[in-house]
Amino acid sequence: SIDVSTLTKKTGYTALDQGFVNTASTRSAITYIDGDKGILRYRGYPIEELAQQSTYLETAWLLIYGELPTASQLEEFDEKIRRHTLLHEDLKQFFSALPHTAHPMSMLSSAVSALSTYYEDSLNVHDPEQVEISTIRLLAKLPVIAAYAHKKSLGQAFLYPDNSLSFVDNFLRLNFGTLAEPYEVNPVLSKALDRLLILHEDHEQNASTSTVRLVGSTEANIFASVSAGINALYGPLHGGANEAVLKMLSQIRDSGEGVAKFVERVKKKEEGVRLMGFGHRVYKSYDPRAKLVKESADEVLEALGVQDPLLDLARELEQIALADDYFIQRKLYPNVDFYTGVIYKAMGFPARMFTVLFAIGRLPGWIAHWREMNDDPATKIGRPQQLYVGPPERHISR
Ligand code: ACO
């Protein structure tokens, strides 16, 4: 790869690279991907090892600070996050202003943006103490906001966090507990969710992370930058795909058209018909995260005592697609979103919460990238060039 950032001014040439297929926007030491070999590493550690041996918070530390934490560092980190889970009571009123039909992703991005109004000190983006406290606040409060968005759509009362619980258990209770009776966390569910969150923690310069970095490059604070990232994640070609997969599977089941016929419609490129959860800009082989999620799917459904015909449909779709020339030639494989929806559904989350779960997973990555960008003296405001194709100079003639 070549660094053209100093060249362009001298040569006067501008490269057009629609969708940034060949253009790096930054150097980064956080995540390594080899899309042809299906390799994903956070700070050098293979995703498979982290999924097996780490936890969401430990991996978050690794991404943000560069090394695995010692036991006491992790304990302190966990403790700090537990202490910052409460939302300002006025911020809770914010949800009353929204319709109960609001998509939880819209509620999430709006509420995260609103955090800036409570923590104006976060505007000092080059003050390490402010960056640190904003990091903790975001990690602590995003799951609470997410659970309140869920509760709002159900018309149920918001619970206060129970900070005696672990990060994931607290989140589950806030989502599924009620004021009426105590909530027992199912350890299988808790472990499975923690593992899924690890798999989503970072993925280098994807659309939402690039958005976080671009907004951050203007010296906008971390809440504003992450809120923008959440909006980028919302799209069905990015994080919104997990919700879209479940919709697609349900439609195939309800229409009775059968998997093979649906695949034919995908291949004909009928308007709006794509095999959601398939294909990736970087992976041209099996997405290593999808492999791990697929392994979990059976395990989790069995442990929760759930039988879902949609999982069989998903497997059948994968089998047909992977044997079909259309998909083989284009190197289209299942991505991380293909099987996650079936698991989230088994856990009891409605489809509209799936992308919200992705956002909680991706948060440590967004924070790590924002901090890396913010600390790098080589960072410049992101400002792409364009090739103008509009009319030449003309004049108003009346
Ligand atoms: N179903 C059918 N055809 C597909 C699919 C798909 N899911 N994905 C790509 N293709 C085809 C395209 O039609 C195109 O065919 P052509 O060469 O005949 O024109 C070819 O494969 C290349 O596709 P592009 O859209 O150019 O690939 P790109 O890298 O721009 O897009 C993307 C990647 C957006 C992920 C795409 O594969 C897609 O839309 N997938 C479905 C949505 C999805 O699952 N998104 C989640 C991605 S992972 C994540 O964000 C966590």
Image (tube, grey):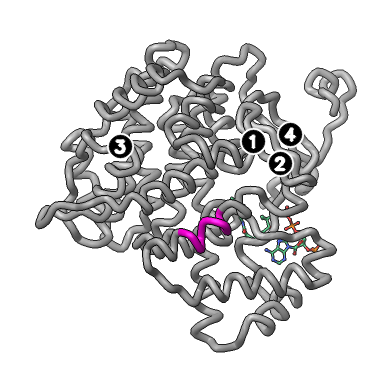
- Which quadrant of the picture is home to ligand 1? bottom right
Disc 1 designates what residue? 46
Mark 1: give few (<14), some (14-19) or many (20+) Cα within 10 Å. Answer: some
Disc 3 designates what residue? 166
Placement of 269 over or under 17, stated as above or below? below
x and y percent of residue 346 in the render? 40, 64
Asked if the residue under mark 1 is in contact with the one under mark 4, i.e. CB atoms within 8 Å, the reply is no
C-alpha gap between disc 2 and disc 3:
30 Å
Q: Quadrant of residue 210?
A: top right
Q: Quadrant of residue 376?
A: top right
364 left or right of 376 in image: left
- Ranked by sequence position, the earlier of labels 1 and 3 is 1
Which residue of the protein is positioned furthest toward the right in this rendering? Answer: 11
- Is any atom of residue 260 visible in this view? yes
The residue stretch that appears in magenta:
293-299
Disc 4 designates what residue? 385
Mark 4 residue's CB less than 8 Å from ligand 1: no
Badge nearest the viewer, 2 or 4: 2
263 left or right of 233 in image: right
At 61% from the left edge and 43% from the top edge, which residue is drawn? 207
- Ranked by sequence position, the earlier of labels 2 and 4 is 2
Q: Nearer the viewer, residue 135 or 91?
A: 135
- Ranked by sequence position, the earlier of labels 1 and 2 is 2
The kind of residue on which mark 3 rests is Ser
C-alpha gap between disc 1 and disc 2:
8 Å
Q: Nearer the viewer, residue 126 or 62?
A: 62
Q: Give the SS element for disc 1.
A: strand
Query: Is 296 within the magenta?
Result: yes
- Is any atom of residue 351 visible in this view? no
Q: Quadrant of residue 221?
A: top left
The kind of residue on which mark 4 rests is Gln
C-alpha gap between disc 3 and disc 4:
46 Å
